[in-house]
Amino acid sequence: MLDLQPGQKLARGVARHLHSHGFATVEEFVPSRGLRVDVMGLGPKDEIWVVECKSSRADFQTDGKWQGYLAWCDRYFWAVDSAFPTDLLPQGTGLIIADAYDAEIIRMPDESRLAAARRKVILRKFAFHAARRLQALRDPGFGVSGP
């Protein structure tokens, strides 16, 4: 915990909270070239949520890619700490207040269901990414330069 960056601590709390709602999560997930979401959650009814963790005003204001994430999820959230000026966050997006240990959904965004073909692509990428992460934990170093 000591070496985690502020945004990573928020992601940890978000992942714990989503887990309590039956979601599986992957952090630093790449849905498409040039995009990397902080937390992607896969829910019990195949819903796909994206959560971007912002640790400061500057972190939020320098994020120019967030709208590109909307095409890859059913619901989009910002996760911030309790001191963050939430009035900066766009209306229509979700809001999660988090710390390193838990989180709370403050504002639920409207749902914008993915098309079936896009959902299939993202579910396959999610499964592949999660399996590769598990392999790396179970067998560190394997596949780094090999198969």
Image (tube, helix red, strand yellow):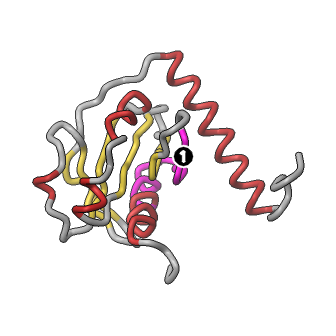
| The image quarter in which residue 103 lies | bottom left
Q: Secondary structure at mark 1?
A: strand
Q: Nearer the viewer, residue 99 or 35?
A: 35
| Figure label count | 1
Q: Which residue is mark 1?
A: 29
The amino acid type of the residue labelled 1 equals: Phe
Q: Residue at x 72, y 48 (%)?
A: 132
Query: Which quarter shows the C terminus?
Result: top right
Q: Residue at x 21, y 69 (%)?
A: 82
Residue 81 lies, in percent from the top left, at 26, 67
Residue 9 lies, in percent from the top left, at 42, 69
Residue reaching furthest to the left: 87
Q: Residue at x 84, y 52 (%)?
A: 143
Q: Residue at x 31, y 25 (%)?
A: 112
Determine whether, in the image, residue 95 is placed left or right of residue 51: left
Q: Is residue 9 above or below residue 79?
A: below
Residue reaching furthest to the bottom: 2
At label 1, counting other C-alpha atoms closer than 10 Å, the crowd grade (few under 14, some 14-19, many 20 or more) is some
Residue 130 lies, in percent from the top left, at 65, 47
Residue 144 lies, in percent from the top left, at 81, 56
Is residue 24 shown in magenta? yes
Q: Is residue 15 above or below residue 35?
A: below
Determine whether, in the image, residue 110 is placed left or right of residue 2: left
Q: Which residues are magenta?
A: 16-30
Is residue 8 shown in magenta? no
Residue reaching furthest to the right: 146
Q: Nearer the viewer, residue 111 or 11?
A: 11
